[in-house]
Image: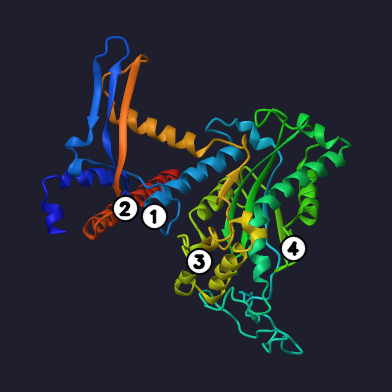
């Protein structure tokens, strides 16, 4: 730490770390950017890392996982909030009329793969069985304990030998295809309900969505989704009068009960049919109202909260496994290690090779992105990041020479390293904490000004 602070380039390095928000694992680049006048060839601006500490420039790692990088995860969550909210209220290139379109917040769950310990309300036992009894493996089929938050038993199966680990893993591997089949079923149900051929539905209405995946305590993924009906050209056009919230809700319920996907047959596990669980929640989204449980802002904040989570929240790993020998030493519960082991065993079967289960054993077979959306639901992460970069560039160049439309940029960059030394990590963590406190103070000031307090 002393050597780092005494280094002549420390102040500039600290400025770089502040610019990346105290990123926990920054990427270091080396290179230059030169901006020239396209007509005269005059150099208008030039930047070269040769004059930077170590001859390199720090940029954000952009990791969405809170466990890997808190500052970048917070920034990604903010982008997710804007992405989801713009699809509900408009803005960021999405027209405000989407607020008047039918919109529902849907939660879809995985089916049961076996009895697990869970939290209960009003002090009720976990899984009471009046007549008691044991399963075929000699374990009790009930649990009279009252679990509390943080209990290590939560999410663990009552009998691991009875638990369908193969079904759990294969459900994860096919959950993306199941979502696509679910959307197709919604469209088919909507078309049938008004007497339109499914192939012609796109000329009348368009289904738009944004969904986020979350691991439950039992380590099974479930999905939270915003589902919206637009006109045939997209969000700028109102859907037909028959496209109501009630009709969409009915279509969602019917599709959730009928959508299925068949996994590849394997003699080891037989024929597996993948379907949604019985628990389904569908709620209309309100634009305003502090008392309304589901509003634009609350839904966007809810989705943004989970986009920074990962399988590690359920006790899994954020890093890929290189061999089966790593599984017994993974910092996870017995239940999670059993799921990883099942991924590895099934991944070695030729008939299931296309599922790439070994490559995704650390996520328990789930290989989808944490957040996905339909093409015209709202803006994109790329557009949000470009707008932020333009804003920062305009702010830093305020009062400088206007480059004009004829300016030509020549850049050459290469990767030269990543991460912090222990001393650098301590200082970067302090920078991130300071900026977090400043954001909290700024939010308190905004809340106070909004209430009109003295």
Q: Which mark is residue 272?
A: 4
Locate residue 84, reporting x and y percent: 56, 43
| Mark found first going from the N terminus, 2 or 3 | 3
Q: Which residue is mark 3?
A: 316
Q: Is residue 203 above or below residue 345?
A: above
- Of badges 4 and 1, the one in the foreground is 4
Q: Earlier in the sequence, mark 1 or mark 3?
A: 1
Q: CA distance from mark 2 to mark 3?
A: 26 Å
Q: The residue tagged with tag 2: helix, strand or loop? A: helix
**Image position of 38 (left or right of 234):** left
Q: Considering depth in this image, is 354 or 362 the residue closer to the camera?
A: 354
* Residue 292 in sight in this render: no
Disc 4 vs disc 3: Cβ atoms closer than 8 Å?
A: no
Between marks 4 and 1, how big is the CA–CA gap? 39 Å
* Disc 4 to disc 1: CB gap under 8 Å: no
How did the renderer colour the structure? rainbow
The residue most toward the front is 350
Q: Nearer the viewer, mark 1 or mark 3?
A: 3
The one nearer the camera, 186 or 273, is 273
């Amino acid at each position: 730490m002393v050597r780092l602070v005494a280094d002549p380039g420390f102040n500039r390095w600290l400025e770089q770390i502040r610019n990346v928000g105290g990123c926990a694992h920054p990427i270091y680049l080396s290179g230059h950017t030169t901006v020239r006048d396209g007509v005269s060839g005059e150099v208008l601006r030039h930047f070269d890392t040769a004059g930077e500490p170590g001859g390199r420039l720090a940029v954000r790692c952009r990791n969405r996982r809170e466990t890997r990088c808190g500052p970048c995860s917070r920034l990604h969550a903010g982008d997710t909030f804007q992405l989801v909210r713009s699809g509900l209220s408009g803005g960021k290139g999405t027209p405000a009329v989407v607020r008047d379109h039918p919109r529902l917040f849907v939660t879809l769950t995985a089916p049961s793969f076996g009895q697990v310990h869970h939290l209960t309300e009003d002090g009720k036992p976990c899984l009471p069985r009046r007549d008691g009894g044991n399963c075929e493996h000699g374990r009790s089929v009930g649990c009279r304990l009252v679990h509390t938050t943080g209990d290590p038993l939560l999410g663990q199966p009552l009998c691991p030998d009875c638990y369908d680990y193969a079904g759990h893993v294969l459900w994860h591997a096919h959950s993306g295809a199941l979502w696509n089949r679910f959307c197709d079923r919604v469209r088919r149900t909507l078309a049938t309900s008004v007497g339109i051929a499914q192939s012609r539905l796109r000329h009348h209405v368009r289904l738009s969505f944004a969904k986020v995946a979350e691991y439950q305590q039992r380590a099974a993924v479930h999905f939270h989704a915003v589902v919206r009906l637009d006109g045939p050209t997209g969000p700028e056009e109102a859907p037909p009068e028959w496209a109501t919230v009630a009709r969409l809700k009915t279509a969602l319920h019917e599709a959730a009960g009928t959508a299925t996907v068949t996994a590849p047959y394997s003699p080891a596990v037989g024929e597996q049919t993948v379907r949604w669980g019985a628990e389904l929640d569908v709620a209309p989204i309100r634009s305003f109202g502090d008392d309304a449980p589901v509003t634009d802002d609350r839904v966007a904040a809810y989705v943004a909260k989970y986009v920074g989570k990962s399988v590690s929240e359920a006790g899994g790993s954020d890093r890929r496994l290189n061999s089966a020998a790593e599984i017994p030493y993974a910092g996870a519960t017995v239940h999670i290690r059993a799921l990883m082991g099942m991924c590895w065993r099934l991944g070695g079967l030729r008939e299931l090779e296309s599922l790439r289960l070994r490559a995704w054993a650390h996520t328990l077979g789930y290989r989808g992105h944490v957040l996905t959306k339909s093409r015209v639901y709202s803006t994109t992460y790329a557009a949000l990041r470009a707008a932020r970069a333009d804003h920062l560039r305009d702010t830093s160049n305020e009062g400088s020479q206007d480059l004009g439309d004829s300016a030509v940029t020549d850049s050459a960059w290469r990767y030269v390293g990543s991460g912090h030394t222990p001393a650098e990590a301590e200082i970067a963590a302090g920078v991130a904490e300071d900026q977090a406190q400043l954001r909290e103070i700024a939010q308190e000031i905004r809340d106070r000004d909004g209430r009109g307090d003295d």
